[in-house]
Image (cartoon, rainbow, N blue to C red):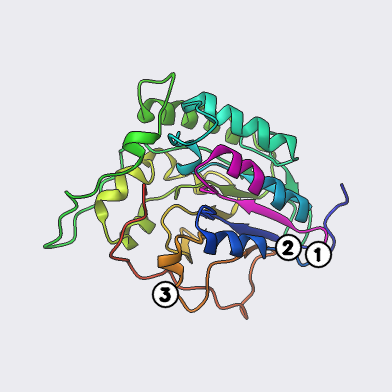
Amino acid sequence: MDEPTSGATLWAISDLHVGHPENQALVDGLAPRTAEDWLIVAGDVAERADTVEKTLAFLASRFARVIWTPGNHELWTPRDDPVMLRGVARYDWLVDRARRHGVVTPEDDYPVWTGPGGPAVVAPLFTLYDFSVHLPHRPGHSDDDIVLTDHALLHADPYPGVTEWCHARIAATQRRLNALPDLPVVLVDHYPLVATPLLGVYHRGLAPWSATTATARWHLQHKTLAVVYGHLHLPGRAVFDGVRFEEVSVGYPREWSRRPAPGGLRPILPAPDATDHPPSPAQPRACPPAGA
């Protein structure tokens, strides 16, 4: 594979949810600016396993390299899915199919971006959540009516539950991060590594399903250039502890249709300069994402 040239870009996007025709049309239109561009896909591509594979294969045909980490939706086992694997077995199936198309997964060696803004390790993580994050409810608002699809469709087999699977992922990922070379890094996860972005979510009761406190200092323990994530459907850019955090989700049509423009590719490297006006975090919405 040719090294990225001076005009190449490392892009990111997440929460494609291509089961919605409007989102599929958006994905069909994604294209690099140069033949050396890379793309980060930070989870929630689709629910059906075959659709996830098809979408990743399509993106891999357009971008020089695609780097993917799963969201919660890829890990669901819908009743109409021809792949009825659950938990770790489903994740392993997705990893195998992604690799067949040259897509980098959390189980592969972390690639090094040598284009503009590099060199930098691009580290796709897979952490899940462990119900350790709790935020105060909004005054006068109750989240008791929230029922997450994860309850029914996201299984953790052979682990007793998602918490145990999360803790195993945290331990394995921490070991890999501790062994990183002495280079800057872009951390990629479906979930935010810190809890602060969750303050923008209208239904605070979603917080336990959206992160883990175990990752709260990961961006400080390395030469982190940026943290890329999705899940919240609140696309925007923020800086925490001097580190750039990019929420790059597309979300559902009912959400992005209310924005000035639908979600699209976000440049991660080279880092945006002072002339680039970062998108402001979206305002809290009154409807939670299906399944969070």
Query: Which of the pair 176/220 is nearer the observer?
Result: 176
Of the numbered discs in the image, which one, if any, rests on residue 18? none
Q: Earlier in the sequence, mark 2 or mark 3?
A: 2
Q: Position of residue 260 (x, y in %)?
A: 48, 79
Residue where numbered disc 3 is placed: 258
Q: Nearer the viewer, mark 1 or mark 3?
A: 3
Q: Nearer the viewer, mark 2 or mark 1?
A: 1
Distance (Cα) linking label 1 and label 3: 30 Å
Amino acid type, callout 2: Thr
Position above or below: 189 against 15:
above
Q: Which residues are magenta?
A: 34-55
Residue 151 relative to residue 136: left or right: right
Residue 2 relative to residue 262: left or right: right
Q: Position of residue 207 (x, y in %)?
A: 31, 48
Of the numbered discs in the image, which one, if any, rests on residue 34? 1
Q: Is residue 9 magenta?
A: no
Contact between labelled residues 1 and 2, with CB atoms less than 8 Å apart: yes
Q: Residue furthest right?
A: 2
